[in-house]
Every structure is written in structure tokens, then in C-alpha cells.
Amino acid sequence: MTPKGHYGVYGGQYVAETLMGPLNELAAAYADAKRDPAFQREFDEILHDYVGRESPLTVCRRLSAKLGGATIVLKREDLNHTGAHKVNNTIGQALLARRMGKKRLIAETGAGMHGVATATVAALLGLPCDVYMGAIDVKRQAPNVARMRMLGAKVVAVEEGSATLKDAMNEALRDWVTNCDDTFYVIGTVAGPYPYPEMVRDFQSVIGREARRQCLAKFGRLPDEAIACVGGGSNAMGLFAGFLDDREVKLVGVEAGGRGLATGEHAASINGGRLGVLHGAKTMLLQTDAGNIIDTYSVSAGLDYPGVGPEHCYLHDIGRAEYSVICDDEAIAAFDDLCRYEGIIPALESSHALAEAIKRAPKMGRDKILLVNLSGRGDKDMDNILNYKKSLGDSASLR
């Protein structure tokens, strides 16, 4: 990464002048915190005592036997407090907010897990919290909306645009511009202007560092492939961070293919997008020839962002990571498989990564290991899953 957060041509700070001051303040504060052992000790202590880290590895013995070929191993971020990887990052950013003297937290959320995680740490630290959420996501992720409100956060439903994650982030940025003196914007993914992509990646890197150490301890070697779903891409960058220097480990990001790339109804920014600027960073975007953002689609609320973290674009360009596409029906099938073969209910986001592993495993030798980041649990998705199956008339799978 170059100064001001460029990864090759990607990243940077493409924002209004009014945000340059707050961003520079944030970058300086984060650089200072990174050098402070006391900050890292408190962060690690809360991850251990409050979140319940480290999260274990789980070998999918029955599913792997059914597939034949490589062994699928899960990094169990679903077992964290709040049920996903998101809390790793919100704790780090909330501690930084307190260090900077900020009195209020705001956040955007799609599937709701980042909103829940932000509301959780706001309650832990005694800070008021507003969470912006697209009106469509408010409806399809009702359990997480209830959790945020129970934790004391105000959930602001955004009706503008496509009423999904992109529009929630737009509104959160508007709030921050207006109230930056006392407000800290907790971005939930490795997107946005510098220093957010670096900062979120660093806080989430605990996933990859743990997984690397655990693989060596459990199997005596590193995995052959490390696979994670990619919307904005924070859980994937967290996993990849542990293996970037291990060239023998293939890094695989999995984008949401929705109803298929050819239909235009998807959220695969790397595979189906083009270079542009969104939310303060240059990245690969789903946009028209005129530069207008295209509405995304995915069965998963957490993957329907029209852009992707700039570091992912760079890793794709230099060939260090491969980015594949999984469609709705494949993700739903993988969801069912993990439930019925392993007794684990995954988030729909994580099901995309699992589906990619299920496709790859039978083509590989039995001595190979596929490490999948199970980024969250699927409690929040149950109504969405049932509605999807009803729309297909899939009565057998509802029993």
C-alpha cells in the first residue's frame, strides 16, 4: 500500500473537502494507536473475554466424505459474540473513537450483523449509536433490526435509491459530514476512503492469524486454499491477511452471482464491474456506461454492495487472489448441506464461500485442505431462506 491508501490504482481518498479534515484526524489517531501497546492489549483482552476468541476450526467430516476429495475445514467466526466476524472490527473502531474523544457512533449495515456489532460495542462503552439500513434490508433482516433496537441503537431506514446497503452508506456519510466533531463513523467493511480499508483489514486480520496458527497445530501444515465470501470484503481480507506471504496457499474470494452474471442481477463487482469511484475510493463497480451505479441483487443482504474493497481489486490484478462467482441457488444448496451434514446453520453470505468449496473439493485429492471462513451464523436468514424456497415451490426442502 502506498501513502494515502492506494493499492495500485485503487483506494485513495475521493471525498468532499469537508471530509478531508476528519479523515486526516482519523488516520493520525489510528497510526498512533497502532504504535501503542496498551491499545492492542485492551483490544486483545476484549476479543478474548467478551467476544470469546479465539474461534475454533471445525472439520466437516460428513460433508467432506459425501463429496469425496479435499477436506473442508471451517473457521468458525459464527461462534463469536453477536454471531459474526463483524464484532472484531467494531470493537477496534469503538476503542479508537473513545481514544479520540468522540461521543457518538454511527454505522451502515446490510444484513444487519455490522449494525448489531456496532450497537453491541456502543452499549459496552456507553455511547449512543445510530445505524443506517436500507428499507428493503430492514424488512428482510427483521431479527437483526430487533436486536439493534434492544441494544439501544436507533435504526434509520433509508428509502432512497435501491434502499439497500449502498444507500445506507450514503446516508451515514451525510451524517458524518454534518456531525464529525463529536461523531465516529464505524464503517463495516474494507471499503471507503483511506484509512478505512487498512484499518478494517487490520482489525479483522485476527481471523487469518489465528487460522494460520491453528492449521499448523491441527494438521501440521497450511491449507491448500483459503476461501471467503466477498461483498465489501472484510471477512475475506481478514482471512487472507494470515496467508498473504504464503504463496503455496491459494486465496479465493467468492462474489454473489445472484441470478447469474448474464442476467445483470448480481453483485459481482470484480467479475462484472468496471473501474470507478464510490464512497470515497477508486475500485471496481457495477455501473452503467455513463457512470451511474447499477442496482445490485443477491439473495444475501450482506453481499449486495455494488463495489468491493480496493485491496481485493489489487490482489486480483496481481494474481495473488482468485475471485469466483456463486449464484443464489448454489448458495442455498450449500446452506442446506451444512445444516444437514454438519449441524451448523451458516449465514447466507458464508454459504457462498461454502458453495465454492463444495464445487472444488471433489476435483482435488483427499490429502488437500480447503479452509472456509464461516463468517456468520444463519439465524438472521431463516425467513429469507424460507421465502426463497416458497418462491421456487420447493416444498420438500421446507419439511
Image (cartoon, helix red, strand yellow):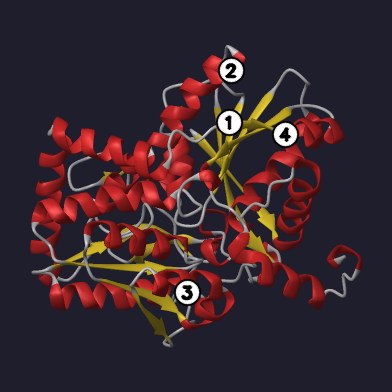
Residue 139 at least partly seen: yes
Dot label at residue 218: 2
Tell me: residue 77, above or below residue 122. above
Residue 67 location (% of width, % of height): 84, 35
Amino acid carrying label 4: it is Cys
Image marks 1 and 3: residues in contact by CB distance under 8 Å:
no
Q: Quadrant of residue 143?
A: bottom right
State the CA–CA distance, disc 1 to disc 3.
29 Å
The residue positioned 38% from the left and 55% from the top of the image is 189
Disc on the earlier residue, 4 or 3? 4
| Residue under label 4 | 60
Residue 325 location (% of width, % of height): 64, 52
Left or right of residue 386, residue 203 in this image: left
Disc on the earlier residue, 2 or 3? 3
Image marks 4 and 2: residues in contact by CB distance under 8 Å:
no
State the CA–CA distance, disc 4 to disc 2.
14 Å
| Residue under label 3 | 145
State the CA–CA distance, disc 4 to disc 3.
32 Å
Tell me: residue 151, above or below residue 197. below
Q: Quadrant of the image for the N terminus?
A: top left
Mark 3, Cα crowd under 10 Å, few <14 / some 14-19 / many 20+, is: many
Q: Secondary structure at mark 3?
A: helix
Between 156 and 365, the residue placed more toward the observer is 156
Left or right of residue 213, residue 105 in this image: left
Image marks 2 and 1: residues in contact by CB distance under 8 Å:
yes
Disc on the earlier residue, 4 or 2? 4
Image marks 2 and 3: residues in contact by CB distance under 8 Å:
no
Amino acid carrying label 1: it is Leu
Tell me: residue 191, above or below residue 151. above
Residue 291 at least partly seen: no
